[in-house]
Image (tube, rainbow, N blue to C red):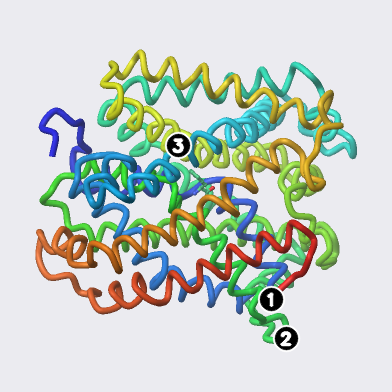
Amino acid sequence: MNENRSTFTGKLGFVLTAAGSAVGLGNIWRFPYLAAKYGGGIFLLVYLILAVTFGFALMSAEIALGRKTGLSAIGAFRQLDKRFTWVGVLGAIVPFIITPYYSVIGGWVTKYFFAFVSGDAKASAGDAYFTDFIARPVEPILWFCIFIGLTALVVFLGVDKGIEKVSKFMMPVLVVLTLFVAIYSMCMPGAMEGVKYYLTPDFSKFSATTVLAAMGQLFYSMSLAMGIMITYGSYMKKDVNLESAVHQIEIFDTSIAFLAGMMIIPSVFAFSGGNEEALGKGPSLMFITLPKVFDSMAGGTIIGAVFFLLVLFAALTSSISLMETLVSILQDKLHWDRKVTTGAVLIFCILLGVPSSLGFGVWSGFSVANMSILDMFDFISNSVMMPVVAFMTCLVIGWIVGTKTITDEIELTGPFKSKKLFNVVIKYIAPVCIVLILVSSVLDVLGIAKI
Ligand code: PHE
């Protein structure tokens, strides 16, 4: 382990920072709408089971790999087995693709937060507000630059003085704000119907797709298979109990996703008079439906402002983890100074983010398989590259170098309680499931078949 590498000050800092990465836009808009679509309680149940088995094993493997080698993805895989350096390289490319477009969406969130604070809440409930906004050539790019500039600032300050400090502040605030909005939302007249819809399992909606959707969501939500957890693991001290840290991150991530459903589903139900369709709108839920919901609520401007602030915090801590991973990969390779590296990464992200933003306006004519530029980046990274990296990670650890390499690292602080489960998941269950996700998402996008 490199003695000069920065570290988190302790377990709390590590857990809150990793949870900061995990809790993001995925938890707040994607989870509730998937849960609503795939049978409510049954989706929750499937997700929970996958989180404590599959998610647990993969996250432990990545963090332990980072801590063992003291390196980010590329170096870590090289150290495991030179022939598989390419897996690290592939994993390292993923955040290079995601950071720019994730920050474009982060820019939208920043804009909405300011709209609510500056008294523009009513306008934001207008039908064409969102589509007009993202189609403009300059304004969304400015918000994107503000968002990514803030991200870079924190990364610039370093692991303990920037990232950990910000997470220790933002994550607890996020929990409090989420609870507040969820309770408020549940108290609205007609909201209980939504709570019932969210929590009651509808077994008729259960199918293989439910499991695949839950697994795809789990990957994204826990920031797996893109080198982030390897990088964060490399900053973890050897005396921190890794197993319990992973459990805490999972609990954090899953609870916020669950509560996001409690914020969104009851209020949308109350607003739409129990019409489930309002929930099925996917991406537009957060930027089109919710402002209308807030507009109809007593005190909606305040609740809306609080809501977008908490989404902003969630998105920021995630984009920080993405950018930190980029900086760490480049630093390991080029040995540049952190500040210079951060500057270079910032310029790269701006250059790559601009086309994603323009793809909704002046460049909307450009599309591949019916996807906008942003959706295309999202598809390549999340649906193709991440499953490949996750599959190869399981293969290299489970079959080439052996799970003992990882379990020994976890056992540095005492017995690894879920060792058997870990071995079985990494060697057998995860690789099979991952291949299924990969095949189904590719077929889905190509429009060939829906499993
Ligand atoms: N885990 C984050 C979420 O749930 C998303 C994310 C993906 C964050 C990739 C960082 C990197 O939104």
User: Distance between the Cα atoms at labels 3 and 2?
Assistant: 38 Å
Q: Nearer the viewer, mark 1 or mark 3?
A: 3
Q: Secondary structure at mark 2?
A: helix
Q: Quadrant of the N terminus?
A: top left
Q: Earlier in the sequence, mark 3 or mark 2?
A: 2
The disc placed on residue 322 is 3
The answer to whether mark 3 is within 8 Å of ligand 1 is yes
317 sits left or right of 123 in the view: left
Q: Which mark is residue 204?
A: 2
| CA distance separating discs 1 and 2 | 8 Å
**On the image, which quarter does residue 163 sit in?**
top left
The Cα atoms of the two marked residues, 1 and 3, are separated by 32 Å
Sequence-first disc among 1 and 3: 1
**In the rendering, at what x and y percent does residue 104 appear?**
64, 31
User: Residue 44, position in %: x, y?
Assistant: 56, 72
Q: Are marks 1 and 2 in contact (CB under 8 Å)?
A: yes
Q: Are the residues flagged by discs 1 and 3 in contact, CB closer than 8 Å?
A: no
User: Is 77 on the left or on the right of 116, as rendered?
Assistant: left
